Amino acid sequence: MRNTAVRSNLLVSEVREVMDIRQASGYLGISPDTLYKYASEGFVPAFKLGNRWRFKRSRLDEWMDRQSDLQAREAEADPRKKKPVQRETTSSL
């Protein structure tokens, strides 16, 4: 019975809708400091609960979709904005 309760708690933390800055930074793959800066500047969707930033997973997913679509449209509109691929240099001895 105890193992079931432990597994149940683990599942709840994995699918949590509202995340703190540490959880959200891990989800986004950026540092907590960077996420704090983005939240303070209004760059990512976030809200404060008391004096702590909170992030809704669904809002972050929507935001990432919009960012991805925006970048794809910009690249299609002006292909010169794409970063060139650096070719590997081989040294001849």
Image: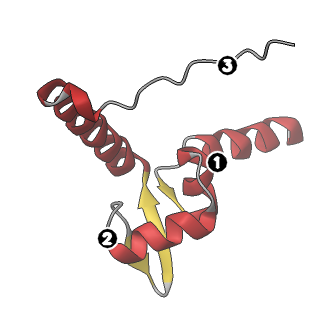
- Locate the N terminus and report the quarter of the image it occupies: top right
Viewer-closest of 55 and 4: 55
Viewer-closest of 74 and 88: 88
Which mark is on residue 42? 2
What residue sits 21% from the left and 38% below the top? Answer: 70
Quadrant of res 38: bottom left
Mark 1 burial class by Cα count in 10 Å: few <14, some 14-19, many 20+:
few
Asked if residue 59 lies left or right of residue 23, the reply is left
What residue sits 37% from the left and 66% below the top? Answer: 46
Residue topped by disc 1 = 13
Asked if residue 7 lies left or right of residue 66, the reply is right
Element on which disc 2 rests:
loop
Viewer-closest of 18 and 75: 75
Mark 3 burial class by Cα count in 10 Å: few <14, some 14-19, many 20+:
few
Element on which disc 1 rests:
helix
Spatial CA span between label 1 and label 2: 26 Å
Q: Residue furthest bottom?
A: 51
What residue sits 38% from the left and 49% below the top? Answer: 60
Amino acid type for the residue under numbered disc 3: Thr
Q: How many marks?
A: 3
Q: Residue furthest front?
A: 93
Residue topped by disc 3 = 89
- Locate the C terminus and report the quarter of the image it occupies: top right
Please name which of the two marks, 1 or 2, marks the residue nearer to the observer. Answer: 2
Residue 20 coordinates in the image, percent (x, y):
56, 65
Q: Earlier in the sequence, mark 2 or mark 3?
A: 2
Amino acid type for the residue under numbered disc 1: Ser
Amino acid type for the residue under numbered disc 2: Gly
